[in-house]
Amino acid sequence: MSSSQHVAYFMKELETEKNIFQAFIEILKKEENALIEGKIEEIDYLASDKARLIEELIQFDEDRNEFLKKQGLVLEKNSIDNWLTELANYHSSLSEIKISWNELLDLARIAQQLNYSNGLMISSQLQHNQRAFAALHCAAGNVSLYGPKGQTYI
């Protein structure tokens, strides 16, 4: 496979990875809505799709990193940006490659932000549930918070 074929394949892979990120973001948005609405069973359903897409994204990331290393690149933003600019300047047919790369980075940032905010909602709900459980436990007359050996006991 020639260098231009490798680059064309890389560009096709970027497009596929972007599509997977878009699907992942949609799942994160559904998860966010389910968390807001308290639909726990829906969250469980979404978790399997989310895990599958994460595995696919990890594989794309590993393949992309391997390809970029074979191009002699250091895996950092400036190095990759410079390489993509050179490609776009050298091959007019690849003028979209830098746009695709930046779109991929934007999708990754969106996914990261959604996942972070969903994690905060889950953590908040968990803390609320723990406080409610402790209150119920105390109300039932079990006010001891430590076991006989000093370990925490609720």
Image (cartoon, helix red, strand yellow):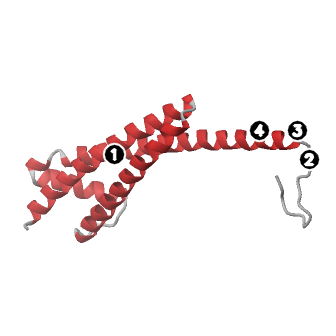
- The CA span between labels 2 and 4 is 14 Å
Mark 4 lies on a secondary structure that is: helix
User: Which amino acid is tagged 2?
Assistant: Val
Q: Residue at x 56, y 30 (%)?
A: 36
Q: Is residue 113 visible?
A: no
Check disc 1: other Cα within 10 Å, few if <14, some if 14-19, many if 20+.
many
Instruction: Provide residue 52's location: percent of width, then percent of height.
Output: 37, 53
User: Which amino acid is tagged 3?
Assistant: Ala
Mark 3 lies on a secondary structure that is: helix
In primary-sequence order, the first of circles 4 and 3 is 4
Q: Find residue 132 and name its label.
A: 4
Q: Which residue is mark 2?
A: 143
Q: Which residue is mark 3?
A: 139
Q: Residue at x 24, y 66 (%)?
A: 67
- Left or right side of 48 for 120: right
Check disc 2: other Cα within 10 Å, few if <14, some if 14-19, many if 20+.
some
User: Which amino acid is tagged 1?
Assistant: Phe
Q: Nearer the viewer, residue 145 or 94?
A: 145
User: Which amino acid is tagged 4?
Assistant: Ala
Above or below, 64 against 123 in this view is: below
Q: Find residue 21 and name its label.
A: 1
